Image (cartoon, helix red, strand yellow):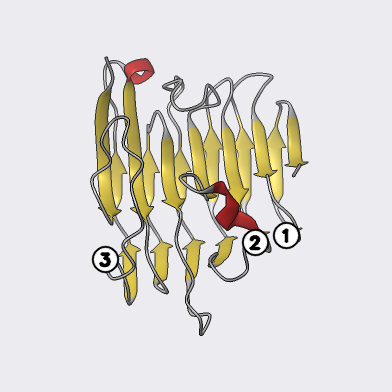
Amino acid sequence: GLSRQKGIAISEHQMKPGEKPKHIPEAITGILSISDNEIDLTNEIPEKTMAQGVFVLGSTGATVKITGNSIMNCSLNSIEALDNYNVEDGNGIVIIKDNRIITSSVGVPVPSPSTPNGILVAWFLDLTGASDPVRRDKVIVVDNQIETRGETSSAITVISDEAVIASNDIRLKGGPKAKAIVQLSSDGVIADNKIEGSGFCGVKVTP
């Protein structure tokens, strides 16, 4: 009973219901730049629409740059980067920088009721990768402007060790369960962010 809506989607495979996909190392490599796009995913039934502005899944040793985009009214995640792998020489990195995000007011409660969100960088299909220094890539989330409007929104959520979350401008304009920065991992740097508005918390760090 759910619809899917994506602005830019780059994935190593098509995910089918009930299927546990396997990582394909050769599928997405090199330099991947997603920059200066304007994406508005307004829809009539946000509570039943998995709307994602920019979605990147399963790169290997890639330099993934998501920069300078304007993304509005996504009912799931405005920017989502999942299960991106490092390689032996340590080249893998995800950089999310200088994006302007305004979430929708209503989110789709799948796969979590905590939506709509701004930026999600995580290990999702294989959570063990978040704490594995061999597999996980570097994560840098800096200089983004994010306005959340959902009652349970999070502006930035990271599930990957040693991530850098810095110099972001966040405004919480939803309800009492909204969160600005959530780090569900260890050894991160959270610094020089500006957080305004009201909600559950400004920063939440938990293993």
Gap in angstroms between the C-alphas marked 2 and 3: 24 Å
N-terminal label among 1 and 2: 2
Q: What element carries label 3?
A: loop
Which residue is under mark 1? 188
**Residue 52 locus on image (x, y percent):** 35, 39
Q: Is mark 2 on a helix, strand or loop?
A: loop
Label 2 is placed on what type of residue? Ala
**Residue 142 locus on image (x, y percent):** 58, 61
Which residue is under mark 2? 163
Q: Is mark 1 on a helix, strand or loop?
A: loop
State which quadrant residue 40 falls in: top left
Gap in angstroms between the C-alphas marked 1 and 3: 29 Å
**Residue 171 locus on image (x, y percent):** 62, 37
N-terminal label among 1 and 3: 3
Which residue is under mark 3? 27
* Mark 1 surroundings: few (<14), some (14-19) or many (≥20) residues within 10 A: some
Q: Can residue 160 be seen in this view?
A: no
